[in-house]
Amino acid sequence: LGMRCNDKTFVSAVYSKCMNGNTRFGADRKQQSHGKFTIRHYAGVVEYSTDGFMEKNKDEIPMETSELLSQSTCAFVRDIAQVISAKTGSQKESKSSISRVSVGKQFSGQLQKLR
């Protein structure tokens, strides 16, 4: 989904990846028109709304944390900081923080595993 993802593109991707052949996933026309879907869990059916989903699930590592990691005396921790920095190299225009794997991406991955 990438950096241009918003609630609408996210739910569209969820529908296209999960609608066909997934018995745990569902979204009727009314739900789809409102950006909603259901997951059939072992304990019952749960409805999810994607309204504000991307903004609510945007996780960021504060720039200060990244700087602290990169200045560590432990080589392993410095290596982690370097990996984080390399993965977010194109996102450095934000001076206050760098991005990492968000809850939204984790949730998307979990939805794929349900297939």
Image (cartoon, helix red, strand yellow):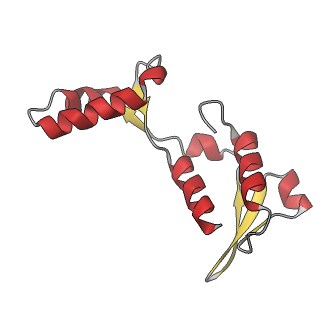
Residue that extends furthest to the left in the rendered view of this protein: 73
Between 36 and 2, the one lying in front of the other is: 2
- The tally of labels here is 0
Q: Is residue 53 above or below residue 73?
A: below
Q: Can residue 65 be seen in this view?
A: no
Location of residue 98 in the rendering, given as x and y in whole percent from the top left corner:
41, 29
* Residue at x 40%, y 23% (from the top left corner): 96
User: Which quadrant of the structure image shows residue 78?
Assistant: top left
* Residue at x 91%, y 60% (from the top left corner): 29
Answer left or right for 47 relative to 66: right
Q: Is residue 15 visible?
A: yes
User: Which quadrant of the structure image shows residue 62?
Assistant: top left
Quarter of the picture containing the N terminus is: top right
Location of residue 111 in the rendering, given as x and y in whole percent from the top left corner:
62, 61
Between 102 and 21, the one lying in front of the other is: 21
Location of residue 25 in the rendering, given as x and y in whole percent from the top left corner:
73, 68
Location of residue 90 in the rendering, given as x and y in whole percent from the top left corner:
48, 21
Answer left or right for 81 relative to 21: left
